[in-house]
Image (tube, rainbow, N blue to C red):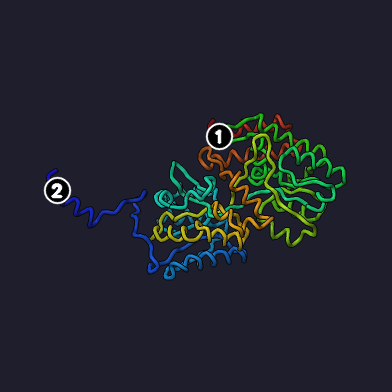
């Protein structure tokens, strides 16, 4: 190529060329306080505290970007997936979508959310986030959780104090405590044993405590965890009725006051304050021989696949959900747990004796939900198989050994292992 062509090419690049993002999106210039526009955000929040959180996040962003309007659009929870997919089919949709994290797979398939990788990879604060809140498919980041919800072990402090017991840190300690609690005439523990995704959600900490993994399914690990539940049922530490309970009923039973422990989430704080007439506390889920992992649930945030201004959408996410201040807003308004390390270590969080243990779990034991063991829909099918066997074992319909064998066979079939 001669010098004239090189010079002309350089001139064209200087006048026209801007680096392209995946999907053909062009990187715009950095946002400034004078930038104006509208960011449309689809969500499914209707509870007063959640609506307040949305307002506070917009106000936080508008402190530095006063000319950008955040247009929140409510879509009912059960309608949002279909609406976002339908919008994408018509090459339209919101700038930002706040949605149930496990839906990331179907949204990617429908092109309803954009590849966040170009933005995320250059985000100075990305190392503040635990890996389990970053949803990637095919090596590309599509969604990130600006906060999480997860399980912990609630305890009735009055019962434990009366019996001279300390909150357990291991499964062995918990089992020993349950024996003393039962002997004293109290009920032991509540959780959900329902044969669905809620059952598997609450089963996972116990399963992972013995080494269970969807990437490397082990019947022996499952048999140990299932055997633990069977022994608890046989000794009346755990009632078989839990196979009919979702996640709300077990906690309602806990708030009556005659149950020592409840496996449940940070979202139950309001219920505890409203109904429990006893002193209570929370500790991280007890560990087994292989520790314990806890799924990180809650909403993920993404740029819409057909956003008209993806750079402004990213700027909003960066300045709200993904900022330390934004995550402290979610903590203060709703009790959602920060996914950033610096937010989790903020005095606002660490001084909260009930929610600090959840924040500790996020940093130490948080697990991606659903696990990264294959295509999302297939992993979810595999999780359902495990949830069904978890329930069958607690109900006495399967032995720990037979339930484990059926679960592993089903998981391997679903995941093609």
Report the residue at 69% width, 38% height from top: 390
Q: Position of residue 373 (x, y in %)?
A: 53, 37
Report the residue at 68% width, 48% height from top: 152
Mark 2 element type: helix
In terms of image quadrants, where is residue 338?
bottom right
Report the residue at 70% width, 48% height from top: 283
Task: Give the crowd class for mark 1: few <14, some 14-19, many >=20 residues within 10 Å.
Answer: some
> Which residue occupies the foreground of this view, 354 or 47?
354
Q: Is residue 83 visible?
A: no
> Which residue occupies the foreground of this view, 184 or 216?
184
In terms of image quadrants, where is residue 409?
top right
Identify whether 341 is placed above or below 228.
Answer: below
For the residues labelled 1 and 2, say whether their Cβ atoms are less than 8 Å apart.
Answer: no
Report the residue at 75% width, 50% height from top: 155
**In-image side of 137 versus 231 (left or right):** left
Image quadrant occupied by the N terminus: top left
Indicate which disc, 1 or 2, sits on the residue closer to the N terminus.
Answer: 2
Q: Position of residue 243 (x, y in %)?
A: 73, 44
Identify whether 295 is placed above or below 80.
Answer: above
Q: Which residue is mark 2?
A: 5
**In-image side of 257 versus 53 (left or right):** right
Task: Give the crowd class for mark 2: few <14, some 14-19, many >=20 residues within 10 Å.
Answer: few
Q: Position of residue 205 (x, y in %)?
A: 66, 41
Q: Which residue is mark 1?
A: 215
Q: Position of residue 234 (x, y in %)?
A: 81, 37
Which residue occupies the extreme right position in the image? 184
């Amino acid at each position: 190529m001669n010098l004239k062509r090189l010079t002309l090419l350089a001139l064209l690049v200087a006048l026209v060329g801007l680096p392209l993002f995946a999907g053909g999106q062009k990187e715009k210039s950095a946002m400034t306080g004078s930038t104006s526009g509208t960011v449309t955000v689809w969500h499914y929040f209707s509870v007063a505290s959640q609506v307040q959180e949305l307002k506070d996040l917009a106000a936080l962003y508008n402190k530095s970007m006063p000319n950008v309007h955040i247009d929140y659009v409510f879509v009912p929870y059960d309608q949002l997936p279909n609406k976002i997919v339908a919008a994408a089919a018509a090459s339209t949709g919101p700038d930002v979508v706040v949605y149930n994290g496990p839906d990331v797979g179907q949204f990617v398939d429908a092109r309803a959310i954009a590849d966040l990788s170009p933005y995320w990879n250059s985000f100075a604060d990305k190392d503040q986030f635990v890996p389990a809140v970053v949803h990637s498919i095919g090596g590309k980041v599509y969604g990130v959780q600006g906060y999480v919800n997860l399980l912990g072990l609630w305890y009735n402090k009055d019962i434990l104090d009366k019996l001279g017991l300390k909150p357990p840190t291991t499964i062995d300690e918990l089992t020993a405590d349950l024996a003393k609690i039962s002997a004293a005439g109290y009920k032991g523990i509540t959780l959900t044993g329902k044969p669905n995704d809620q059952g598997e959600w609450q089963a996972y900490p116990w399963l992972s405590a013995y080494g269970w993994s969807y990437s490397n399914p082990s019947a022996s690990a499952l048999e140990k965890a299932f055997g633990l539940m069977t022994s608890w049922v046989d000794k009346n530490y755990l009632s078989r009725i839990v196979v009919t309970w979702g996640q709300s009923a077990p906690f309602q039973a806990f708030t009556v006051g005659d149950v020592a422990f409840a496996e449940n989430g940070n979202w139950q704080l309001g219920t505890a304050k409203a109904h429990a007439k006893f002193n209570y506390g929370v500790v991280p889920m007890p560990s087994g021989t292989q520790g314990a992992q806890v799924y990180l649930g809650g909403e993920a945030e993404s740029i819409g696949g057909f956003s008209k201004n993806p750079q402004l959408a990213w700027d909003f996410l960066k300045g709200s959900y993904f900022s330390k201040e934004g995550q402290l807003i979610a903590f203060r308004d709703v009790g959602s747990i920060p996914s950033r390390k610096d937010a989790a270590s903020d005095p606002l969080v660490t001084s909260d004796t009930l929610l600090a243990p959840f924040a500790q779990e996020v940093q130490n034991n948080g697990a991606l939900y659903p696990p990264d063991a294959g295509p999302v829909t297939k992993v979810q099918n595999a999780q359902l198989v495990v949830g069904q066997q978890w329930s069958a074992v607690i109900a006495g319909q399967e032995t720990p050994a037979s339930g484990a064998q059926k679960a592993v066979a089903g998981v391997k079939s679903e995941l093609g292992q």
